[in-house]
Amino acid sequence: MMRTLQSRKRFFAGLFTLLSISMLVSCKWNRSVTEYVYGKTPIVEIGTDVLYVEDIKQVLPLGLSDADSTLFAQQFIKNWAQDVLFYQNAIRNIPDTKDIDRLVENYRRSLIEHEYQRRLIEQKFSSEIADEDIEQFYNDNERLFVLDESLLKGLFLKISNKSHDLSDIRKLYTRQDDESFEEIEKYSIRNAARCEFFYDNWRTVAEIEVLLPALEKPLETLLKDNGSFEFKDEEYIYLLNVSEYAPKGGIEPLDHARSRIRGLLINSNEVSYMRKIKEDLYDAAIEKNRIIFHQ
């Protein structure tokens, strides 16, 4: 690592010396008043456009040799210079940029309005969507919440088959009380190659299946028979306790759908809310004579 850093420093020092000479020659014809960025090292400039050493450092791939780094930097500088020169030439040949300026200003305006609208809606509805409204929408629209993949909650442990106290952990991992959780956590810190508690949040069956060794049957099939499982390979024992299971094609659990329902309810209300905001602003401006109508 130290050698790599020293190599990059030598490379930039050499590159800076080389290009400084060419910069003085090539830019002598157009020495405009240039404002440099404080704390950065200019390496090439064309008119008031400046390329800095730090800009090249940000994009220079790691692991390149000095020679390859030099080639990369030279090509980057050439591409930058070509873009700047082309833009400057375009400006000279399109002196009337009123239409472009108008498009840019319209785009900037739309971005500001969009961000303001987002904040208004977030402030208005994030606290106004009650749990009762979410549950009502969920109960009235079950067809919207059919699962396209299976979900489960539970606990997963991956333990070396040489670990001590395996018999104790086999008893603990199927229990769902604070005392057992605490013991499992202590045990996993010392012995488990991997431990995941997900009793409080849903995971897809596919996410959990990739943590297991190769199975003779899909995990999906096994989940229909039992809630706790033990698998083995040559090195590890895999323990899985499933507390809840929601099969593909069934109805999505409310606690999994809650955030999505909140978004749906916000979206359904935001159009009328924004219309009212604009109408109120208009009415207030009329009342205060801020809008002048020319006859």
Image (spheres, grey):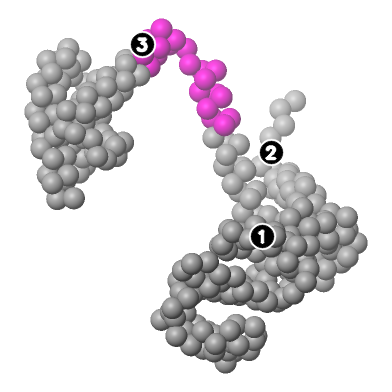
Which quadrant of the structure image shows residue 145? bottom right
Mark 2 or 3: in front is 3
For the stretch drawn in magenta, what is the main secondary structure?
helix
**Callout 2 amino acid:** Ile
Mark 2 or 1: in front is 1
Q: Nearer the viewer, residue 243 or 221?
A: 221
Residue 132 drawn at (x, y percent): 82, 71
Residue 215 drawn at (x, y percent): 63, 61
Name the residue carrying label 3.
89
Residue 119 drawn at (x, y percent): 61, 54
Tell me if 152 is positioned left or right of 210 in this view: right
Tell me if 252 is positioned left or right of 203 in this view: right
Q: Secondary structure under badge 3?
A: helix
Name the residue carrying label 1.
216
Residue stretch rendered in magenta on the structure: 86-107
Q: Quadrant of the C terminus?
A: top right
Numbered mark located on residue 291 in the image: 2
Q: Secondary structure under badge 2?
A: loop
Q: Secondary structure under badge 1?
A: loop
Q: Nearer the viewer, residue 28 or 248?
A: 248
- At a point 36% along the width and 11% down the height, the residue shown is 89
Calculate the distance from the C-alpha at mark 3 to the C-alpha at mark 1: 68 Å
Who comes first in sequence, dot 3 or dot 1? 3
The image shows residue 180, relative to residue 193, as above or below, that is below
Which quadrant of the structure image shows residue 238? bottom right
- At a point 59% along the width and 74% down the height, the residue shown is 239
Who comes first in sequence, dot 2 or dot 1? 1
**Callout 1 amino acid:** Glu
